[in-house]
Amino acid sequence: MSKLVVLSFENGDLHRGFPSVTARFWEEGDSHYMKFNGSLPAAPELLDLYRNWRLLYLALYRRLELNSRIEIIGGDVTNVSAVDFDSTCKQLSDKINHWLDSPSFLRIEQELRTQLDPTQEIRVIIETDDRLLQQLPWHLWDFCTAYPKAEIALSASEYRRTKRQPTRTHKAKVRILAIFGNSKGINLKKDRAILEELSEQAEIKFLVEPQLDVLYKYLWQDEGWDILFFAGHSSSQEKGTLQLNKTDSLTLDQLKYALQRAIAGGLKLAIFNSCDGLGLARDLAELDIPQVIVMREPIADAVAHKFLRDVLWAFSGGKTLYVAVREAREKLQGLEKEYPCATWLPVICQNPAEPLTNWQDWYAPPSNSTANRFKQKQPHRQISIAQNQLGKVLLASMAIAALVVGVRQLGILQTWELQAFDLGLRLRPNEGLDPRLLIVEVTDNDVRQQQQKEMRSLSDAALTRLLEKLRPYRPRVIGLDIYRDFPVNPNQPKLVNYLRDDRLIAVCEVQRAKDDYPGKDDYPGIDAPPEIPKNRLGFSDLPVDGDRVIRRQILFMDINPQSACATNESFSFRLARLYLDAEGIQPQRDSQGNWQMGNAVFRRLESDTGGYRQLDAGGYQMLLSYRAADPVAKQVTLSQILSSSLDAKLSTLVKDRIVLIGTTAESFKDFHLTPYSIDSGSRVMPGVTIHAHMISQIISAVMDRRPLLWWLPLWAETLWIWGWSLVGGALGWQLHSSLQQGLAIATALGILSGLCFVLLLRGGWLPLVPAAIATAIALLVADKVTQTDHKS
């Protein structure tokens, strides 16, 4: 099912801002919706930038002498270069996104991105009466890039559903009334040829440069029209205007009653393949037409023809109008070298009160019509041979799936599966900084400036000054990710009191037996700071895979009471738990023994989780879903804080946040490999940053409903692998040329990879490598089996 999003901009404009922006979204056909409020600041510079862009656009069209479906009169700009125009396009795009990134609008966008799935079709309707806001190229919003099946439409702020006349008969074809106006300087014959390509599915009446009374006559016909099409010259000034023929121009007000009759009789869509059509759309919106497609600016003939063919064939071929428009609009990019900003022009204007319908809903073709010619004839083979081959393919696919699952259980595929998992994480979009965290990093330069006698990353004096700076701004939690297995220097008595603050959590390292490190003695761990009680300690141990990459985090583990680090709770979990405690959220066990906080359930890793088959799952572990390779939170250096250069910003940076203090100095070698490290020598991540990712994962899952990484049970993974083995077997059964098989396996593996990646965006880790191997082997085996049968 598709999703519908309506963004209402009320009581404002770009000069004054929009103090009330309301977002409602729901699933098509569902009467229950979610609603969120926000606002947007004034952006008069955006308005000026758009007007400047439009002047340059018109001037560029004049200079290029492109055939346009509007008569472009002279303007203030007489000379423009493509470089200037490209720069203005970039500035306008950046400004629109900067405006929509405003903090007052951020909650709406966060909710949209939380609730919506990039794989779903999404209709986004901008509901406003502000003409300048309607004129903006909304498709440049970054949201549209993140959601490839979303398309934005415009709507008036007031609308209602039209009372339609009951239809008396089922139509055998879609009915189109095509009006061709004044064709001076443009080629309308190609528009007609494109429409005629639909003759098998559509009954089309062509009116060429008609007189007004003729147009009235056809609009008043009892047999309702489904689509009203216009091609020719048009414009939008105070009112939308059409050049009906070489002598007559008219506004839609002059067709009001006839159009009302046509809409009541079933008119569902108007397409104006002409220029500057938003004025026409506004006039039709007052008559409550369901949907209109117009061009927001002047358009060249070639662009108009390309868009018309692509949108009609996609729509008549079964795609929804919104998907058809987006595809046709984006296909115009191939013309933009010659026709700049072609993809900016088409726009849907929607009546939100009207339900979404499809081309196939508008008519009922007879059973013997050409619409049914696409049914494939059954191949002329002996049924017994086909059944025999099918049985062999099924058995082969089961055997291959069992073989691949067996090899996988031995751990032979683990390295490949982990590498594929890492690649999927690297391809995910950057989620940005977590605003609840601040990292205070101690750099090599910070260490040198402290002038210590001992080789420590953070001296007692520097730590005292740092905490003195932070405490007045009331951070919610302070995490000290620096080992302090020694008492406070007597010269720093204040530090003792600071370390006793209930908001401060410190780290230690757990004792390990020599069995964990063959050839070495027992590792005693690293003591906790003597001033810190056990309930404010967290172990800093990071679970490392065999390739030294950190893909997991530990919440708890059993600790030897004699260990130097006698706490069973990890540093990251204790910080996150203390932060959430202030929100009234406490951890608890669910019915299956998993830890749960709020609605987030933290599934415990097992030895055969996901692609793991050789995993030490001791303690309570979970998969780590990094936000990105880039910093997870705002970072400042120790020197920046101690030098008072950030005093003016400290309240914003620190108040009510988790402040993590840790070293990023290369001399202390606290760096680790992550899924973003393509090889052992690149892109390592400081330990304090990894702890920040772990903390962010827990808090975001609880407060933002950010998906945690999940996996299928073993039986479901086996069915998944067998299913793809069946796909390979079916391809090998039907296709026998090397070229066909190569294309088929490439397509199947592309679909498999795409599915796995899309599900990974929602947190799912599915078996990609085993399924790919099973598909390829099954295709080859099935081909051999069926070829043998053919020869016999």
Image (cartoon, rainbow, N blue to C red):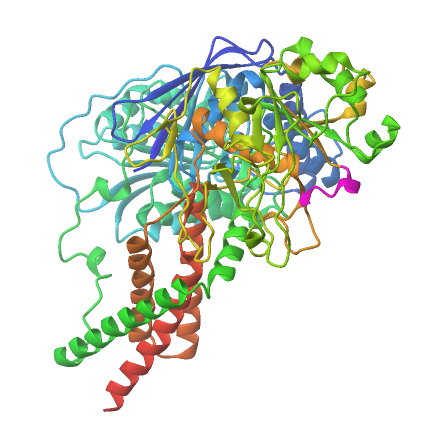
Please state the horizontal and vertical placement of residue 741, each as a whole percent of the image.
40, 73
Front residue of this view, candidates 465 and 526: 526
Residue found 32% across the figure and 71% down from its top: 400
- Residue 169 picture location, percent across and down: 11, 38
**Residue plotted at (30% across, 32% down):** 214
Instruction: State whether residue 720 appears in this view.
Output: yes
**Along the line of sight, the residue nearer the viewer: 703 or 550:** 550
Quadrant position of the N terminus in the picture? top left
Q: Horizontal and vertical percent for residue 467?
A: 71, 16
Q: Kindly give the residue lying farthest to the front in the view shown.
A: 562
Residue 302 visible from this viewpoint: no
Q: Quadrant of residue 502?
A: top right
Quadrant that contains the C terminus: bottom left
Residue 256: image quadrant is: top left
Judge from the rendering whether residue 101 lies leftward or rightward of residue 365; answer left or right.
right
As for residue 728 lying within the magenta part, the answer is no
In terms of depth relative to the viewer, which is nearer, 140 or 538?
538
Q: Is residue 379 left or right of residue 239?
A: left
Image vertical order of residue 519 relative to residue 469, above or below: below
- Which residue extends farthest bottom? 792
Q: Is residue 707 left or right of residue 78?
A: left
> Which corner quadrant of the image does residue 267 belong to?
top left
Please tell me which residue is depicted at 37% across the width and 48% down the height of the picture. 314
Q: Position of residue 609 (x, y in %)?
A: 40, 51
Number of callouts in the render? 0
Provide the residue span drawn in magenta.
665-671
Q: Give the residue displayed 47% in from the left and 47% down from the top.
A: 305
Q: Is residue 417 above or below residue 143?
A: below
